[in-house]
Image (cartoon, helix red, strand yellow):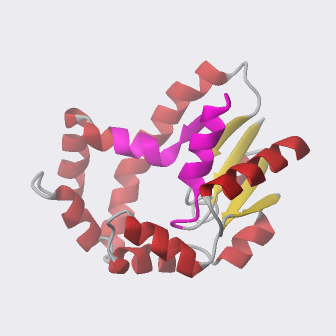
Amino acid sequence: MKIAITGNIGSGKSEAIKFLLSIGHKCISSDQIIKTLYQNDQSRGYILKRIGVTSKNYKEEIIKRLVDPVFNKNLKKVIYPLLHSQKKIIAPKFHQHTPIFYEVPLLFEERLSQDFNYTIFISATPKKRKQRVLSRGVSANYFNLMNQRQIKENIKQNLSNFTINNNGSILNLRLNVIKLLHTL
């Protein structure tokens, strides 16, 4: 059984995945795979060359250029095949485990929901999500840009099988995840 976990920027997807991993569930995180791609010199070099960004301050440069739809489309054309190939390598290692949780931030935006048996939507108010993102050292402009590019929460919630409200503490999120696990 494949279960997607999605939500808008700062909703708590990664925190939910960390908790699921800590209690023994198998999880595949898109964000973690992409982070690993950028940490590897070879894959980072390949990505940066293909998108026309120099190695110096590449993170800041990518963030600045995300406002350009052509750049954003090109970035996806480079990153997504790498992301999918890594998932294909990881997933077979978990084939005997059920369920497998997949963190997929742009699940509905990229029309990937049909690949999963169930979808869990992590919900939080825009104010709370922005607060979380800013506490990570990310700029308000970046939050606003990413937030505008994502489908509105009420639509994602309606498209999902389950919703976990995450406006409280990490402990509350964990308790809500446990409650949901009992219904699966």
Residue 104 makes an appearance in the image: no
Taking depth in this image into account, of 134 and 122 the one nearest to the observer is: 134
- Furthest residue to the right? 183
Q: Residue 184's quadrant in the figure? A: top right
Above or below for 92 versus 145: above
Quarter of the picture containing the N terminus is: top right
Residue depicted at 54% across the width and 50% down the height: 14
Q: Nearer the viewer, residue 117 or 111?
A: 117
Where residue 35 sits in the image (x, y, percent)? 36, 45
Residue at (23%, 59%) from the top-left corner?
59
Residues shaded magenta:
9-36
Seen at 64% across and 63% down, the residue is: 108
**What is the x, y in percent for residue 7?**
62, 63
Kindly tell me whether residue 135 is visible in this rendering. yes
Q: Is residue 166 above or below residue 46?
A: below
Horizontal side of residue 87 vs 22, given as left or right: left
Q: Let me know if residue 173 is in the magenta part.
A: no
Q: Predominant secondary structure in magenta?
A: helix
Q: Nearer the viewer, residue 75 or 165?
A: 165
Residue 12 counted in the magenta span: yes
The image position of residue 179, as x and y in percent, is: 83, 49
Residue 154 appears left or right of 130? right
Position of residue 146 measured from the top left corner of the image (x, y, whole percent): 44, 73
In the picture, residue 72 is in which quadrant? Answer: bottom left
